[in-house]
Amino acid sequence: MELGQMMNGNPPGNYMTPEWVDALVIALLDEIERVYWNTHQEQWERYQEPNIKGLHFRAYYWGDDEVEAAKPNLKFDFSEQDIRWYKHPGRSMSFSVEFTDREWIEWFQGGLRVIRAADSNDVY
């Protein structure tokens, strides 16, 4: 965990993400970017709310409001799991609920379904 995260930033989740889960999160963000382009015909900046039903995304909060800082950066309605990071996705990421490898794969697949459901050009 980053010292800055402990002192000033998002409160960390209960568990630090293994590198392969970091990769799953980054893949979901890449998929949001693809779907956002298909829907809006413009680049999604990872500080913007993508406005996808069932997905709660929040860029890193830089302010001093502790209530706002306590909110997760990535959460899906179908899961109790939430993901937090320090300043940028992939940096000191943590999660709230301990998952087995299989549960992570199911979470990732569920996230893809939520994101792809918003794709106006979805061919899956």
Image: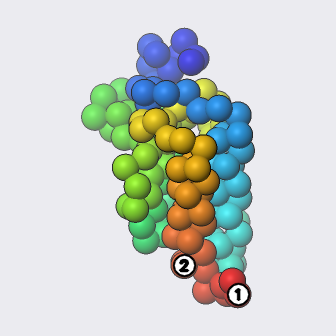
> In the displayed structure, does residue 64 sit left or right of residue 20?
left
* Disc 1 secondary structure class: loop
Residue 114 in the image, given as x and y percentages of width and height:
52, 70
Q: Residue at x 71, y 40 (%)?
A: 20
Amino acid identity at mark 1:
Val
Above or below, comparing residue 104 to residue 55 in the picture: above
Amino acid identity at mark 2:
Ala
> In the displayed structure, does residue 13 sit left or right of residue 115?
left
Residue 55 is marked as none
User: Which residue is tagged 1?
Assistant: 123
> In the displayed structure, does residue 60 sit left or right of residue 54?
right
Q: Earlier in the sequence, mark 1 or mark 2?
A: 2
Residue 71 in the image, given as x and y percentages of width and height:
37, 40
User: Which residue is tagged 2?
Assistant: 117
> In the displayed structure, does residue 84 sit left or right of residue 36?
left
Please say whether residue 32 is visible from this viewpoint: yes
Q: Nearer the viewer, residue 94 or 52?
A: 94
Q: CA distance from mark 1 to mark 2?
A: 10 Å
